[in-house]
Amino acid sequence: MNIRISLVAASLFVGTALFADSANIADALKNGKISGEFGIYAEQNSTKNSDDGGYGSGSFDLGFTTDALYGFRLDVGSRANHAFWEVDGGEYNSDTKAILHTANIGYSNEYFDVVFGRQVIELIWMEDFHEALVGVIKTVPNTDIVIGYSQRRAVADFDRPLEGFARLGDSGAFVADAKWRGISGLVVNPFLYYANDVAAWAGAKVDYDREFATFSLGGTAEYTQSDEDRGSDGSFLRLEARGVFKDIGAKVGFIQTDKNGGAGNITAAGENLNLFEDGDQVFKADAQTFYIGANGKWRQFTFGGILGNTEYAGGKLREIDITAAYELTNNLNISAAFINGNGNGNSDDYNKVTAGVVYSF
């Protein structure tokens, strides 16, 4: 339930403030915005022929963004997580107690946006927090073009142990990503990534959604191919069809990876495509995944479910995820999930229950 702003969305937000710049540094600080959240998270799991596990943790996130001054803006943020209890000891596997996940300076005008420093990025194959230099070009009609370089990546969410900034290969990773929206309902998203001594991977994602009087229909096609510096090349294919009637949505899809290399190092800079709560087998060699899911909303409740069956080199796994959330107030959200895994290994036969409460401001 951790809420993030994508790089493109953040750039548009910054751009809207250009016409209301503060007059000086003091005003930029005074007119800045403080944001944050308190979170409590717990999970309990039971695995076949193994001891039960689980932990409970608390989280506090605090951030501050200055108002724009001549198009410039400063943004800082940090998160601290702490495990309160563990069922058997060792489940909360992290030595990182706190992390400065955001510390950047941004500049925006009508032609481009640029952000330098620690920042959140949400692209297809680059996600979480990155030490990066990223630019968004806004001069091409109906198109957002992102060009950037990331040196290190970190994970800082309320519902998992913190992961400190770790280097991406020997020389970091470069990205070029474009989204074209020239036709209503259609988004064409080609992309290219390169990490020296790791891999280069490229592909495209196409989304199309069309609204009718009482329902909508849509689909996604995405393919990525990697050129690995070591080992077999990887690939990732996903096809999905979906529909929405009133507040109820449904989807069905298929995912396949390379027979020998799986997804390779396509996920080296993070990924934003795994549909499952766990779903680690989706990226393995020769993995074929069929899935069907549904989601809906009723008053302040949102709920969802997905059933996926993955067959991969050496094994298979069926995963069922059922999720629910309740928006108690505009700032307070309660969530829960049930995950069932059933496979051909003892570690693949498990049940997991999670619960979280987040208050944001």
Image (tube, grey):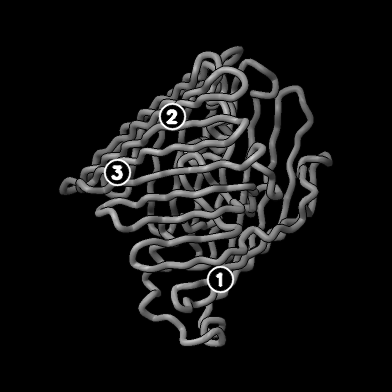
Residue found at the very far left of the displayed protein: 213
Residue to which mark 1 is pinned: 74
- Amino acid tagged 3: Val
- Find residue 265 and name its label: none
Spot occupied by residue 3 in the image (x, y as percentages of width and height): 52, 57
Q: Is residue 181 visible?
A: yes
The residue lying toward the viewer, choosing from 170 and 26, is: 170
Q: Which residue is rendered at x = 51% and y = 57% of the image?
A: 4
Residue to which mark 2 is pinned: 224
Spot occupied by residue 133 in the image (x, y as percentages of width and height): 54, 54
In the picture shown, does residue 41 fall above or below 125? below
How far apart are the alpha carbons under marks 2 and 1?
35 Å
User: Helix, strand, or loop for circle 3?
Assistant: strand
Q: Is residue 329 visible?
A: no
Q: Are marks 3 and 2 in contact (CB under 8 Å)?
A: no
Q: Which residue is rendered at x = 57% and y = 17% of the image?
A: 232
Q: Earlier in the sequence, mark 1 or mark 3?
A: 1
- Amino acid tagged 1: Leu
Spot occupied by residue 235 in the image (x, y as percentages of width and height): 47, 24
Q: Quadrant of the C terminus?
A: bottom right
User: Helix, strand, or loop for circle 1?
Assistant: strand
How far apart are the alpha carbons under marks 1 and 3?
31 Å
Residue to which mark 3 is pinned: 187
